[in-house]
Structures are given as C-alpha cells and as structure tokens.
Image (cartoon, grey):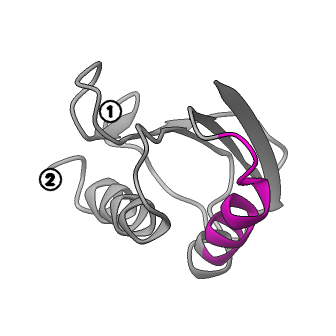
Amino acid sequence: METLTYRFDGTTAVRFPTEAVLVGVLASGNLEVLLEPAALDGAMAVRIITAAKGFGTIWEAVIGDFAQRHPLRDVQVSINDAGATPAVVSLRLDQAVQTLRAGGQP
C-alpha cells in the first residue's frame, strides 16, 4: 500500500450539510471518496491510499486537475482508490463535490 498526500490553496468556501460527504460504499473494496471539513487555513488537503505503487505522477495530475476545477477551502479529501483508473477517480471526485453542493444527497 502507498499513501500519497497533496495540499492545494483553496478559494471556494463550502458548507457541509453533515459532518462529512462519502461517495462509494465504505469498506466495500470499491473506490471511496470522503470529503470532510477541516481547519486548514484555507487549503484543501488530499490523502490517497492506493495499492498501486509508483503512480505518484499520475495521481498528482488527476488531483491537480481536480483542485483547479474545485478549489475547495478547508476541506480534507480522503481517497481509497481500490485500483480505480484515473478517469473513474476523477468522476467520483466530481460526484463528491456535487453531493456536497446538493446538501449531502447523492
């Protein structure tokens, strides 16, 4: 297992309808994305747990693109990739942001 962490400046404040937003099924072995409020001085932190080692550059590109499209402030993003491809991860991240903006309802 490999854990990757990234941090980005955020500009978009968000209001969480609950303590966190989860897309994917927790502990299912499938891709899971969790968004949580966090005191990060306006930043967004991303933590990825992946079984595929050596893909840091690809992850950096996927997460960097997400951070440009959704520069969330004071948000912790946790990803358990379960071997998902970058395109699927990107779609799931967008789904998490949509769920957050819809008040926590998928």
Query: Which picture quadrant has residue 65?
Result: bottom right
Is residue 106 toward the left or the right of residue 80 in the image?
left
Which label is found at residue 106?
A: 2
**Magenta stretch holds residue 98:** no
Taking the image as shown, residue 68 lies to the left or right of residue 98, namely: right
- Percent x, y of residue 106: 14, 53
Of callouts 1 and 2, which one flags the residue occurring earlier in the amino acid sequence? 1
Callout 1 amino acid: Thr
- Amino acid found under the numbered disc labelled 2: Pro
Q: Residue at x 71, y 72 (%)?
A: 61
Q: CA distance from mark 1 to mark 2?
A: 13 Å
Q: Is residue 64 magenta?
A: yes
Image coordinates of residue 76 in percent, x first then y, are: 62, 39
Stretch in magenta: 53-65
Q: Residue at (30%, 62%) from the top-left corner? A: 95
Q: Position of residue 29 (x, y in %)?
A: 29, 27
Q: Secondary structure at mark 2?
A: loop
Q: What secondary structure do most residues of the magenta stretch adopt?
A: helix
Asked if marks 1 and 2 touch (Cβ < 8 Å), the reply is no
**What is the count of numbered marks?**
2
50 vs 55: above or below: above
Instruction: Tell me which residue sits at (62%, 69%) in the image.
Output: 62
Give the side of residue 18 with respect to residue 67, left or right.
left
Q: Is residue 24 above or below residue 87?
A: above
Per the image, label 1 sits on a secondary structure element best described as loop
Who's the residue at 38% across and 68% down the image? 94
Residue that carries the numbered disc 1 in the rendered image:
18
